[in-house]
Amino acid sequence: MQQLIAHAGLFAQTAAETSTSTSTSSAPQPPAELIFTIFGFPVTNSIFTAWVVIAILVLFAYFSTRNMRTLPSGVQNFWELIVELWVGVTEQTMGRRRGRLFMPLVATAFLFILFSNWFGTLPIGYFFIRNPEGHEVPLFRSADSDLNVTAAMAIMMILIAEVLELVSLGPLGYLKGLFIPNPMRWLEIFTRPLSLSFRLFGNIFAGEVLLATMLTVAPYVMFIFIGLELFVGLIQALIFSMLSLVFLSIATVHLDVHDGRAEGESIEGEMAQASHGQPF
């Protein structure tokens, strides 16, 4: 009788461990999974998905704009809508000269993040591959659900902004701005990429966990959560792009103040003119 109870307890413990491992493996984990290596460099499924998204964007842009027409039609309307939207946003924020200079960078970041987020909502988690370690891992994973990808994009944006501020102010003016008048200015250099990367990563990764959980709990109402994640993906792409635009605008505001040709073309230029008593 005691042996029977012991065997029953062992069976129950094994079943519980199996169910727990199954439930945890069905949801994505924070570290991205290794799928293969190239010349000794590891390639995770999030990096591979980022490459796929980049290829899709490049091919889509090439084939939809190779026969440009004066009167747009078809997918050319899509690209002109994106360009006009971001040209208007950047020019209203930074002025015509700086806005058209940084519009390609900000619009590219927006499109990459948007397509990466939406690509992650597709049923791509059913494609598995056996990695060099012998484990079956998903081939695709949303690039923005990997903190390494979001951190790389955030650091790139902040580095561009800081380099431009260094160029516009000069080395002495830049070093002076780190301590005077705000001695905590140097903390922004570290907190900005943290806020950009963790916000994007947290929202997208949480969305993937939500979709994986609802797929096992309530698969018949998945369309509601898929629509929610599509909306969240759009909002997160806008937030990342707009914050990057604000950081770039703050870093290069001195270019407009010291360049008389650009004054009056942006909000900062209007403020500079108002301080000198000039009409807008």
Image (cartoon, rainbow, N blue to C red):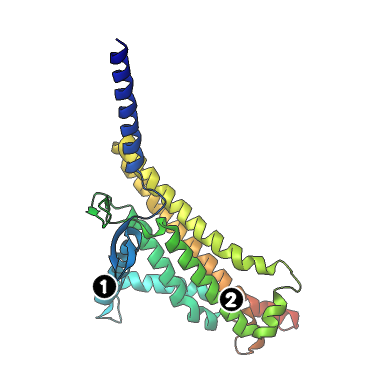
The x and y percentages for residue 123 are 27, 50
The amino acid at mark 2 is Glu
Name the residue tied to disc 2. Answer: 162
Crowding at label 1, few (<14), some or many (≥20) Cα neighbours within 10 Å?
few
Is 253 in front, or is 28? 28
Is 251 in front, or is 221? 251
The x and y percentages for residue 148 are 44, 61
Is 129 in front, or is 124? 129
Q: Residue at x 40, y 74 (%)?
A: 83
Instruction: Confirm or deny contact between disc 2 and disc 1 (CB under 8 A).
Output: no
Can residue 275 be seen?
yes
Q: Left or right: where does residue 113 sit relative to residue 136?
A: right
Q: Left or right: where does residue 272 sit relative to residue 240?
A: right
Q: Residue at x 51, y 68 (%)?
A: 155
For numbered disc 2, what is the local secondary structure? helix
Name the residue tied to disc 1. Answer: 59
Q: Residue at x 28, y 68 (%)?
A: 56
The x and y percentages for residue 166 are 61, 81
